[in-house]
Amino acid sequence: MALCRAQRVRQFSTGRAKVYGWGSGQVLAPMVRDTPSAIASPVRLDIAGVPYAIASGWGHSLVAVQEQERTHRILSFGLNRSGQLGFSMDEVDSAKGFVKGIPQESRIISMACGREHSMVIAQDESGHHELYAFGNNMYGQLGLGESRHNQTRQGTFVIRDSASKVTGYEGSPVQLTCGLDHTVFVTDAQKVYAMGWGADGQLGVGPHSTSDKDTPTRLARFDNKSILKLASSTDYTFALLEDRTLWVWGNSEYGQAMQGRKIDRILEPMQVPIKHDIKDIACGGPFSLVLTTEGSVLSCGYGVLGQGEQPVETLEPLRIRFPWPITQIFATTDYAACIDDAGQLYTFGLNGPHARLGLGDTAHAFEPRKVLFEDSTAVRNVALGMHHALVLS
């Protein structure tokens, strides 16, 4: 008997939005009482106000919260060695607090986190968008005109421990993504900019450039192009355009750029020769994912690809089997997550002692497995850190 897809209705809670987390106890300790070394299944985080956006980096996370009608703040928690939480502290161990430097009347439009840096797009009361940056700036990934390269004293640790406004671009920022140590964002003037670490071509600024950039540097290839989505998490970047063409630049030594071959470094944007209509994109470390408009997920590259224990490598995108159509995809270094059309969450990839897959154990998942929640949670968004993950429902 054929399944009736039309009966699958996504049931979002009529109550207040919730945030769940799992994985590294060190990262989540400020948010969960009596935290073990690892949290293997989703636990609800105690957050005052109404959470509406999430982002995760290597060992820290951000949650945008509306506290009153016109009051917005970003709750940050986790590791803070470089000020990536947006406030200063004497200890570098796990902590929580609120990001400083962003007006509380500004609504958060987009957030992204790298290894130890954080980026935020905020909209002020007049509707104008501003780009803010904080955390590690050794490679210029904050776009503030400073990095390790222009310090008078060698070995100087370059950080910002409160949000600083980024300038030097045309238009208003509308979306962004972060790799480990680089940032890419797009403006409403149809311009794409990149800054930070460039050794693997992850900035995409030209065929002869692997240098770092400490201010927003325009990618002329995308002038007057409408960008649907940017994606990164490590050292390469995807850009999905409104015409449904997919572009990539950065590291592809494992074939994760979907070019049908391995390329050490792609120094300027290269179109991906894919025959499917693409709806969503996600960049892992040695692998990548794309979501088709029909709800199918394809994986490419090296590692746990969601195909079972084999293959561990493919230069051509392969379809991952799911019981239902997928609507969103997410990936980071060695694992991935997918949301289906009923708001159910699946994860797959390398697990480990931190239980970062949220499946109740530490075993690797070579194929997608469903993440179980205590209630009938319908997942809206996911943020994947290196050893922890967040869900907004």
Image: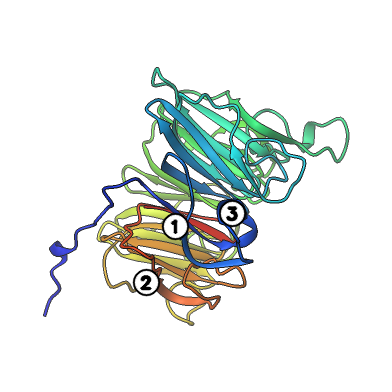
The answer to whether residue 344 is above or below residue 154 is: below
**Residue at coordinates 48% horizontally, 82% vertically from top-left?**
310
Q: In this view, does 292 lie to the left or right of 219?
A: left
Q: What residue type is labelled 3?
A: Thr
Q: Which of 276 and 3 is in front in this view?
A: 3
Residues packed near mark 3 inside 10 Å, few (<14), some (14 to 19) or many (20 plus)? many
Q: Nearer the viewer, mark 1 or mark 3?
A: 1
Q: Which mark is residue 234?
A: 3
Q: Which mark is residue 320?
A: 2
**Residue at coordinates 26% horizontally, 61% vertically from top-left?**
342
Q: Is residue 229 left or right of residue 62?
A: left
Q: What residue type is labelled 1?
A: Phe
How many angstroms separate mark 1 from mark 2 (CA)?
14 Å
**Residue at coordinates 71% horizontally, 42% vertically from top-left?**
82
Q: Which mark is residue 330?
A: 1
Dot 1 or dot 3: first in sequence order is 3
Q: Where is residue 85 in the image (x, y as percent from the top left)?
A: 63, 41
How many angstroms separate mark 1 from mark 3 (CA)?
13 Å
Evaluate whether residue 222 shows in this view: no
Asked whether disc 1 touches disc 3, contact meaning CB atoms under 8 Å apart, the reply is no
Asked whether disc 1 touches disc 2, contact meaning CB atoms under 8 Å apart, the reply is no
